[in-house]
Amino acid sequence: MNLIVQVGIDDTDSKKGMCTTYVCAVAIGRLEATNVKILGCPKLIRLNPNWKLKTRGNCAVAFTAELEKRQVPAFKEIILRTVRELAELQAEDTNPGVVFYYGEKIPLKLKSFSKKVIQDIVTIEEAESVARLVGAEMYKFKLGRGVIGALAAIGNTLDWDRTFELIAYRTPENRGSPRRIDVNSVIEMNKKTFPRTFDNLDPTTGEIRITPHTPCPILYGIRGETAEMVIKAHRLVKALEPIERVVVYQTNQGTDEHLRNVKISEAKPFWSVVVNGVVSQKPKVIRGGHVIFRIRDSTGEIDCAAYEPTRQFREAMKKLLPGDEVQVYGGIKEKPGLPLTINLEKLRVLKLASYFRKENPRCPSCGKRMKSEGRGKGYSCKKCKTNSPPNSARLIRVKRDLNLEMYEVPPRARRHLAKPLIRVKFSTREF
């Protein structure tokens, strides 16, 4: 009887290069060349986006293989050799980890661990403890911090929600040079596949969003709702340089899996939260063009920030007024000496406060607007010499230029895990 082995890999990249998904892709290619059967699509799992030790997108990968027991030693050696060969081991903060889990069914303990790694902070010791409980094997390179994400990637079964990403990789000689793809083909691809693919373009700037801006092996990545759709989109994109290999990953990107619903007093650094509150301080623009305002609930107050890269999103935030009821989505980073701040990803306007302006009465004789004589002294018409009492003024409701709807940051500022509104419209889950 064949064995089912699940493999997790993490922390092989650095800010200067490599990509953990590429390490996974190469390992899978080498395994398939030895007749190891890979089951389904590999997984690309984004972890806590607020963790200070993350590298770029903070992703871990996992895949499932079916093999004969006699193949296990060579199977493990191919994977460990690939990590040793490709990981940025010379970088101080790159500390890869590889995990092997034998079996098809994922234990509840491992699922819970995965969720915690996406929403909170987890230590190597915690990962080792969970691995012992579920019988997983861990292999560390240097400090081996990557075992945390590797175990979490195995534990995430994507039952909650999932999307897909097709990644096309560059040939070695082109890495580090400007990426070459036909821009018009991407625009055409977006027209034919959106919204079943998403975040291909930034509609506010026209910027192509499928190509990264780092010296990694990725040429482009296309995100979508199904494997079939991202493959269709890939066939519409014209690459102007060779493609080494293509892999389709199933992923938690664009799912909001990092968010937790909390009261303000419960919010902690490194969490991503959903908070319902009332605007308690009018938005202000600070140096750099960032927009800051405060909200409150029954447990306290907290700052919310829309940073300059969010562009038009900031313009909507500027229109908020004290008393408006909102639901905010975003991450909290630790900034010593500064108050906790929710870095906004989305905001839903639930209810607008009513604001009124006082309108002076019109002269009953000539119809012109009367002038105030001072506080509590009434109004007079300079032309007709007529007077009106103080209570003759009218209160006019101010029309608010803000809708009761969800607002989101543009693709250029969106985190990998944040669910785009185009996906929210089709979601049945409520926080």
Image: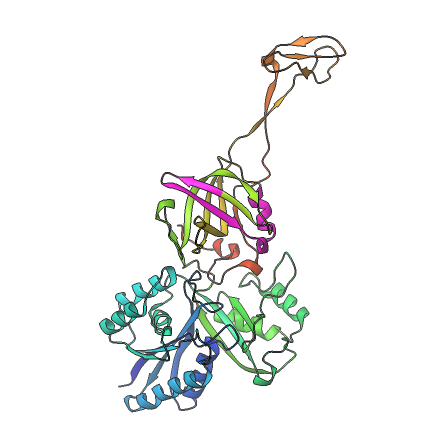
Query: x%, y% of residue 120?
Result: 36, 60
Residue drawn at (51%, 43%), measured in percent from left and top?
293
Query: x%, y% of residue 225?
Result: 49, 65
Region of the chain picked out in magenta, as a range: 294-318
Query: x%, y% of residue 219?
Result: 57, 76
On whether residue 216 falls in the magenta region, the answer is no
* Up/down of 391 relative to 398, above or below: above
User: Is 193 left, or right, of 275 in this rendering?
Assistant: right
Q: Does the rendering let one see residue 383?
A: yes
Extreme right residue here? 383
Residue drawn at (33%, 69%), measured in percent from left and top?
155
Quarter of the image containing the N terminus? bottom left
| Total numbered circles | 0
Query: x%, y% of residue 27?
Result: 43, 84
User: Is 221 left, or right, of 72 in this rendering?
Assistant: right
* Up/down of 114 relative to 363, above or below: below
- Between 129 and 252, which is closer to the camera in this rendering? 129
Q: Quarter of the image holding residue 336?
A: bottom left
On whether residue 304 falls in the magenta region, the answer is yes
- Between 162 and 374, which is closer to the camera in this rendering? 374
Scheme of image coloration: rainbow
User: Is 392 left, or right, of 85 in this rendering?
Assistant: right
Extreme front residue here? 337
* Up/down of 392 relative to 259, above or below: above
- Between 198 and 113, which is closer to the camera in this rendering? 113
Q: Does the rendering let one see residue 106?
A: no
User: Is 402 left, or right, of 351 in this rendering?
Assistant: right
Residue drawn at (46%, 47%), measured in percent from left and top?
328
Q: Quarter of the image holding residue 45?
A: bottom left
